[in-house]
Image (cartoon, helix red, strand yellow):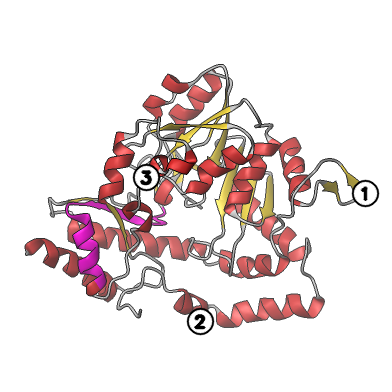
């Protein structure tokens, strides 16, 4: 289906950078540099500089970044990891894949972990906390790091949606032992397929993730140190990402402009609950990976917008919450806000390619629905 306002506009995104991207691709192809080559190292160095961390390890996906970081941190059988249910299933799956037990707490009004609930579920088996910085807003990490320090717990951050977002002047992914990011094509910085990376200031942890991503070997000597995985960020993808990385600041600025337009155009509708407007000052710098509203008559609103030619994202929310899926064995968790938000939340189109006219069309379409 062709939309007047697509949720993302990947073709336009590509065409704006076509000559730069094709130039990078030709360079890599002509050199035959595909696996663990200079472009990947350059990407890792560039990202380390951007985030102000010592080590960046490019891997096959954001899911792999979480999985390998947890394993490298020693998470395994009989351990408990505290996280949330209002997230992608991957956040919980990686805990299970390590042989550990996910412990779910509810979220607050910003869709991030309700820190007030964390200490209530800590047990002698608790090993780690895995907060999710959802929609481009950082969790309240000051309080969370205080709790982790008090109970001698590690923090692994799911920062898949929060590249360059910050709280109290510190960037997502840099608070805990490791931060994990996705390079899925629809992210602010997206590859042309799957990709991800983990960041840390811990040399031992970084070395362990390097080994885990590359069959458990120390490539410089060829020695096998453990049973690992095959999860290396492709050098070709890294070359493309190096091109895109230069444009990230302007893309984030545009996302914040669009979020401000939505806030201005929709804030008087009592039927909606909007995310906080972008602030130039204050604790949080939001990058708006998504612009998620909570809406009365959400399902009917989604149908109305789709019929109007507006592509919205509601698939996560229209399906039942993760802890209600029988096969996951999570039904024993009581998460009332997660369940409420699953009935109300919808993401409006927001990307760096969207025009002011398209944003105005979305605003008018939402207003028309409620004026009926």
Residue displayed at 82% across by 41% down: 226
Residue 320 in view (yes/no): yes
Numbered mark located on residue 313 in the image: none
Residue 74 screen position, x and y as percent: 69, 31
The residue to which callout 2 is attached is 15
Report the mark closest to the observer, 3 or 1.
3
User: In the image, is residue 166 part of the stretch drawn in magenta?
Assistant: no
Residue displayed at 59% across by 67% down: 193
The residue to which callout 3 is attached is 321
Numbered mark located on residue 221 in the image: 1
Q: Residues within 10 Å of mark 2 (few under 14, many from 20)?
A: few
Looking at the rendered image, the quarter that the N terminus falls into is bottom left
Residue range of the region highlighted in magenta in the rendering: 287-306
Residue 338 screen position, x and y as percent: 33, 40
Residue displayed at 43% across by 41% down: 326
Q: Quadrant of residue 34?
A: bottom right
Between 199 and 10, the residue placed more toward the observer is 10
Residue 53 in view (yes/no): no
Report the mark closest to the observer, 2 or 3.
3
- Between disc 3 and disc 1, whose residue precedes? 1
Q: Residues within 10 Å of mark 1 (few under 14, many from 20)?
A: few
Looking at the rendered image, the quarter that the C terminus falls into is bottom left
- Between disc 2 and disc 1, whose residue precedes? 2
């Amino acid at each position: 289906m062709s939309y007047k306002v697509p949720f993302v506009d990947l073709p336009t995104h590509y065409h704006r950078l076509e000559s730069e991207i094709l130039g990078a691709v030709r360079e890599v192809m002509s050199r035959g540099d595909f696996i663990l080559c200079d472009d990947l190292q350059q990407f890792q160095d560039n990202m380390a500089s951007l985030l102000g961390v010592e080590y960046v390890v490019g891997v096959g996906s954001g899911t792999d970044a979480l999985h390998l970081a947890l394993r490298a941190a020693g998470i395994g059988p009989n351990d408990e990891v505290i996280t949330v249910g209002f997230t992608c299933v991957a956040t919980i799956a990686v805990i299970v894949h390590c042989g550990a037990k996910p412990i779910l707490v509810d979220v607050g009004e910003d869709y991030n972990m309700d820190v007030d609930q964390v200490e209530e579920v800590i047990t002698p088996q608790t090993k780690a906390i895995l907060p999710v910085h959802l929609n481009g807003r950082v969790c309240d990490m000051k309080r969370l790091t205080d709790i982790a320090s008090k109970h001698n717990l590690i923090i692994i951050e799911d920062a898949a949606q929060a590249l360059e977002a910050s709280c109290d002047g510190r960037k997502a992914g840099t608070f805990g032992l490791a931060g994990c990011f996705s390079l899925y094509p629809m992210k602010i910085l997206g590859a042309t397929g799957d990709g991800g990376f983990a960041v840390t200031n811990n040399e031992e942890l970084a070395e362990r993730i390097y080994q885990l991503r590359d069959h458990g070997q120390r490539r410089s000597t060829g020695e096998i140190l453990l049973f690992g995985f095959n999860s290396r960020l492709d050098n070709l993808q890294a070359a493309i990402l190096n091109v895109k990385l230069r444009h990230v600041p302007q893309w984030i600025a545009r996302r914040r402009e669009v979020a401000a337009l939505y806030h201005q155009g929709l804030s008087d509708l009592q039927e909606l609950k909007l995310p906080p407007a972008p602030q130039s000052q204050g604790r949080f710098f939001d990058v708006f990976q998504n612009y998620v509203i909570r809406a009365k008559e959400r399902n009917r609103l989604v149908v109305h917008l789709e019929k109007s030619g507006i592509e919205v994202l509601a698939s996560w929310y229209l399906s039942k919450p993760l802890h209600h899926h029988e096969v996951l064995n999570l039904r024993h968790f009581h998460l009332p806000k997660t369940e409420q938000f699953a009935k109300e939340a919808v993401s409006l189109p927001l990307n760096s390619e969207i025009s002011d006219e398209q944003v105005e069309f979305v605003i008018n379409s939402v207003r028309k629905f409620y004026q009926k």
